[in-house]
Amino acid sequence: DAKTTQPPSMDCAEGRAANLPCNHSTISGNEYVYWYRQIHSQGPQYIIHGLKNNETNEMASLIITEDRKSSTLILPHATLRDTAVYYCIVSLRNDMRFGAGTRLTVKP
Amino acid sequence: DAGVTQSPTHLIKTRGQHVTLRCSPISGHKSVSWYQQVLGQGPQFIFQYYEKEERGRGNFPDRFSARQFPNYSSELNVNALLLGDSALYLCASSFRGRFLPNQPQHFGDGTRLSIL
């Protein structure tokens, strides 16, 4: 079973930051937090991952709370092409257990 | 560089038949995982292989099996197909080394299997 909780859906205005929350209160010390997204009929796309420090790459930023029980994925300037299902996953040995994810809709 | 490639992209079978799905990982990746995604749900983990050995198995019946070849490509086999096996089957590869166990997986676009 997935060990994360995400809101089923969110909306965001185009050009604004999208902040997607994830709760993982039972995360263990060595488990990483991964974020993927899936656009209809494509395979999931890797976005970012981290252990305890905040991470940033060309796609997004990942903010992990100090107690590691929750995290937020930030898309700094959402575009219409960011409309997708976003999955938050915690994993130790690279075996991904996906939940239902958050369906993000970016609106013009 | 080529990403994860899967074949075929679409497949139609009838109940009771068997099917073989194929996956070629990203060059340099030695770990391959298989997932099943039923319409409207997130992907469900089936198998993980690393260095040709099974390293993880999800909650799937014995009708599902897989193997990894010396070139790190992989096959997923499903026997005695049921209507409920209709799904998108995804393959993912990752660079997994002794000191880099948590590298992210990269997914192909899947094989859509329809059972009639």
Image: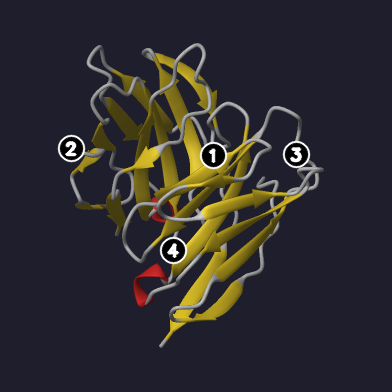
The answer to whether residue B80 is visible is: no
- Is residue B79 shown above or below B115? above
For discs 1 and 2, the disc positioned in front in the rendered view: 2
Where residue A58 sits in the image (x, y, percent)? Answer: 40, 52
Three-letter code for the amino acid on which mark 3 is drawn:
Ile
Left or right side of A67 for B102:
left
- Disc 3/disc 2 C-alpha distance (Å): 34 Å
Task: Mark 3: give few (<14), some (14-19) or many (20+) Cα within 10 Å.
Answer: some
Q: Earlier in the sequence, mark 3 or mark 1?
A: 3
Residue placed under numbered mark 3 in the picture: A27
Residues marked 3 and 2 touching at CB (< 8 Å) = no
Left or right side of B27 for B115:
right
Q: Earlier in the sequence, mark 2 or mark 4?
A: 2
Where residue B78 sits in the image (x, y, percent)? Answer: 36, 36
Specify the quadrant of the image occupied by residue A84: bottom left
- Tag of residue A96: 1
In the picture, which quadrant includes the C terminus of chain A? bottom left
Residue placed under numbered mark 4 in the picture: B39
Q: Secondary structure at mark 3?
A: loop
Q: Are marks 1 and 2 on the same chain?
A: no
- Label 2 lies in what chain? B
Q: Residue at x 59, y 74 (%)?
A: A9
